[in-house]
Amino acid sequence: MDQKTIVEAINNAQKGIRQYLEIMRLFSDTNVSVNTEFQRKYNSFYRVRQRDKHFYETYYQYMQCLKGQNVEFQQVLRFLHSKLNRFEPSFSSKLAATHNPNLPIWDKFVLKNIGIKPPSFYSIDRTNKTIATYERIKKWYDQKINSEEGHLIVDLFDDIVVESSSITDLKKIDFVLWQIRTYPKHHPGRYVLRPTGKETPSMNNNLGVEPADDNSVIVAVKNKFSKTGSPTEIPLLRERRGRRSFSAELSDQGISVGNLDKQPFLPWKVFQETIRILVENDGRAKRGDAMNCRLGEPNLPTDSIEGYIAQVVYGKQEGETVFRRITPIACILIWAGVCKAGRGELILLSKFRGCQ
């Protein structure tokens, strides 16, 4: 990363930095098991959503009970699994890092950038494999902090952020990496910023529309096209304006659809990131309502499919309007035998839950 890229990332992270510092202040000063202000801000910042009451009560009671202790990722992971029967590496890391800010967050972008995949949904000995993966994340951060680039990030962060002394060097690097989320395909040693501004998907834009790696989900979609031919008609979940299907045409870079008049092209990255958010939420996620909501509102959260795609693929920020794409995305994945429809949500079929 060059200095300009780092400075831009730090400036873009200013809102998140303020939110983080407020969360850490409340964590220190309040009983987090009952303090609703802390819980609301923590849930928003770390995207702890779509969980039931028992999850939140268990999570925040445990967070409070651990105060004053030397907290490690593996103990949190095992505790939450034993109490909730849920495997939560990301939320476990966030709880541990709240107690010890020198611990990294389990984040899909970091995993992607360091070139490793998390254990699959049905992996044998998943717990120990997850702990080993987290140790690799820690090692990666240690190397980054002590690298020339890491020193540059920390120095620039200290120059720009007034309260930088309250933030660990690891977290400073984390804030920058959160803004800079993907490696260029042919330059694995560098980061690039995701585009912002207007959504303009096309065959020649910078939204990751180069031919995708053929993971099993993309293979499933392509195999379905090989049976039907291209273009083909994709069934709608329900009739719309007298139509029961829409056209779809396959290309090396993605799929062009007939029911998105202004922006008909869906790059493979849209489908790959849809699978990511499904896998991270135990195989199901809300569709999201872009017709009536802005990004970040209750019916279009950033962990809904529509909201996540808008933010991660198209560079949208909370509070902005979002172009509606969920209908063709969901219908294509259902048609290809990758997902099934739920009430207001999309559900990943079990055979694909180890795919990212």
Image (cartoon, grey):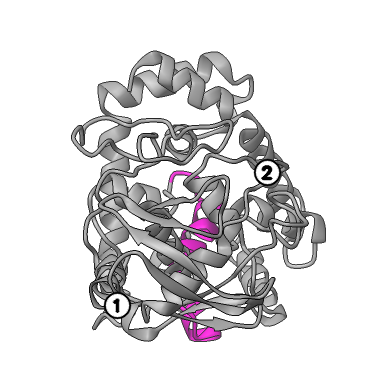
- Category of crowding for the residue at label 2, using alpha-carbon neighbours closer than 10 angstroms: few (below 14), some (14–19), many (at least 20): some
Q: Nearer the viewer, residue 328 or 197?
A: 328
Distance of label 1 from label 2 (alpha carbons): 34 Å
Query: Magenta stretch mostly in which secondary structure?
Result: helix
Q: Position of residue 297 (x, y in %)?
A: 75, 54
- Category of crowding for the residue at label 1, using alpha-carbon neighbours closer than 10 angstroms: few (below 14), some (14–19), many (at least 20): some
Residue ID at (33%, 78%): 352
User: Which three-letter amino acid code belongs to the residue tagged 1?
Assistant: Arg
Residue 126 image label: 1
- Looking at the image, is mark 1 or mark 2 earlier in the sequence? 1
Task: Please state, as top left, top right, bottom left or bottom right, where the N terminus lies in the image.
Answer: top left
Q: From the viewer's perspective, is residue 353 above or below residue 322?
A: below
User: Which three-letter amino acid code belongs to the residue tagged 2?
Assistant: Glu
| Helix, strand or loop at mark 2 | loop
| Helix, strand or loop at mark 1 | helix
Q: Position of residue 174 (x, y in %)?
A: 45, 39
Residue 184 in the magenta stretch? The answer is no
- Provide the residue span drawn in magenta: 80-102
Q: Nearer the viewer, residue 111 or 257?
A: 257
Q: Nearer the viewer, residue 188 or 7?
A: 188
Residues under numbered marks 1 and 2 in contact, where contact means CB atoms less than 8 Å apart: no
* Residue occupied by mark 2: 318
The answer to whether residue 296 of the structure is visible from this angle is yes
Q: Position of residue 42 (x, y in %)?
A: 67, 54
Residue 306 image label: none
